[in-house]
Structure formats: structure tokens, C-alpha cells
Amino acid sequence: MTKSTQNPPPRKFELLSDDEDYQITLAAMSDPDNPPMTDADFERMERYGVFGAPWTKPGYGQTKKTN
């Protein structure tokens, strides 16, 4: 069996209509268990990232990203 060297066909996505997007947004906003994040919530978040191959370094894990 030989491998195909051709790329797969591109995927096709249907975009939501404005009405569908509005209905999904309303449903998400009305969920009491998952309130939407506010600007203050985003301000409190800290940026973390892992650099390089962490499993090759001693004490690997998430390190605080410095801008």
C-alpha cells in the first residue's frame, strides 16, 4: 500500500447567520452556571506559556511568560 502525497480536500464550513449567532449568544448569556467573562475578569488573568520541550528540562512545567 502506498501513501498518498496529495493534500486532502479543503474542509468547508458554513458560517452562522446573524439570527443563529444571536440565538446562541442569548442561550449562552442566560446560562446561570457559566456567566460571561467581564473585562475585569480578563484583567485578572495572567499569561502563562511553556517554552521549548518542557520534558527535556529539569523541573518542567508551566513557567510564567514575561512580555
Image (cartoon, helix red, strand yellow):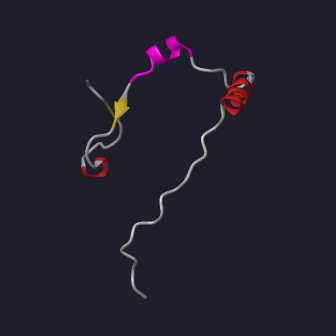
Q: 7 or 59: which is nearer to us?
A: 7
Residue 44 lies within the magenta run: yes
Asked if residue 25 lies left or right of residue 57, the reply is right
Looking at the image, is 45 positioned above or below residue 65? above
Give me the residue at 62% from left, 21% from top: 36
Residue lying at the far top in this picture: please name it: 40
Looking at the image, is 7 positioned above or below residue 11? below
Asked if residue 49 lies left or right of residue 26, the reply is left
Say which quadrant the N terminus sits in: bottom left
Give me the residue at 64% from left, 37% from top: 16
Give me the residue at 66% from left, 31% from top: 21
Magenta segment, prevailing SS (helix, strand or loop): helix
Which residues make up the magenta segment? 38-46
Number of marks: 0
Q: 2 or 32: which is nearer to us?
A: 2
Tell me where residue 40 appears, x and y as whole percent.
51, 11
For residue 23, which quarter of the picture? top right
Residue lying at the far bottom in this picture: please name it: 1
Tell me where residue 18 appears, x and y as whole percent.
66, 29
Give me the residue at 25% from left, 45% from top: 52
Say which quadrant the C terminus sits in: top left
Tell me where residue 27 appears, x and y as whole percent.
74, 27
Tell me where residue 55 appears, x and y as whole percent.
31, 51
Asked if residue 31 lies left or right of residue 8, the reply is right
Residue 51 lies within the magenta run: no
